[in-house]
Amino acid sequence: MSENCPDCRADAPGGETLSLADSSACGASSQARPVADAERRAVLHRRVRWLVAGTITYNVVEAIVAVSAGTIAASSALVAFGLDSVAEVLSAVAVAWQFASADPERRERVALRVIAVSFFLLAAYVTADSVRSLFGGGEASHSTAGIVLAAVSLVVMPVLSGAQRRAGRELGSASAVADSKQTLLCTYLSGVLLVGLLVNALFGWYWADPVAALAIAAVAVREGLEAWRGEHCC
């Protein structure tokens, strides 16, 4: 065994082979390293599943509140924000489906396609809604619920995104990283929504939100293209 173990030969003084007992211990040690790697990957898989579950739960609540508040206030921005949450749920469900498999890597390409489509759908809706708002789509009324929701999302979303991105990079999972960027995009939209609602409430500048939302739509297209090509890795 000592002759077949380069680590044993390297550790032996003067390049000599170790005793049978020492080489056996060395072999056991070298065999243990892949097991440790497997255990770490299992921990990361569970972490991703929990983070995805948290993302789905939060976004379902976020979508219900945003669409309801947006309908009451006639706020296209709030409704769009709620639909962004639906797109994010779709992205998270794709990653959850991937990591429910015993071999998540085999499902990664399909998951990336779903995430890319969710980015494209989000960009298409936000663009159409922003253009409509800019050219006479109606003025939204003040929404306290929308302001509170946007502020809470600005705190929650970066935490979820950062944790999933770190786990995804350590795993080398492009889909987990792509989904974390979808969550991060929701953070940007939360900021845009908050500024738009506050500016509209304080100054009546209805155009501020749709203009900023168009910039977010452009970012969504870029992220969608990267997800489609599988470039969201470490």
Image: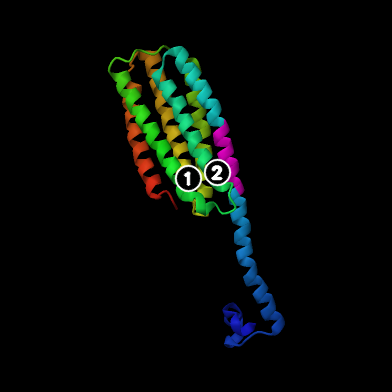
Q: Do tag 2 and tag 1 residues touch (Cβ < 8 Å)? A: yes
As drawn, the label of residue 140 is: none
- Please give the range of residues in magenta: 46-57
Q: Is residue 174 visible?
A: no
Above-or-below relation of 153 to 232 = above
Q: CA distance from mark 2 to mark 1?
A: 8 Å
SS state under label 1:
helix
- Residue that badge 1 annotates: 111
Q: Position of residue 135 (x, y in %)?
A: 27, 17
**Crowd band around label 1 with a 10 angstrom C-alpha radius: few (<14), some (14–19), many (20+):** many
- Answer with left or right where residue 199 lies relative to residue 68: left
Q: How is the image coloured?
A: rainbow
Q: Is residue 209 visible?
A: yes
Q: Residue at x 35, y 31 (%)?
A: 124
Q: Position of residue 102 (x, y in %)?
A: 60, 53
- Residue that badge 2 annotates: 97
Q: Main secondary structure of the magenta part?
A: helix
SS state under label 2:
helix
Which amino acid is tagged 2?
Answer: Trp
Which amino acid is tagged 1?
Answer: Ala
Q: Position of residue 161 (x, y in %)?
A: 50, 40
Q: Residue furthest right?
A: 21
Above-or-below relation of 33 to 96 = below
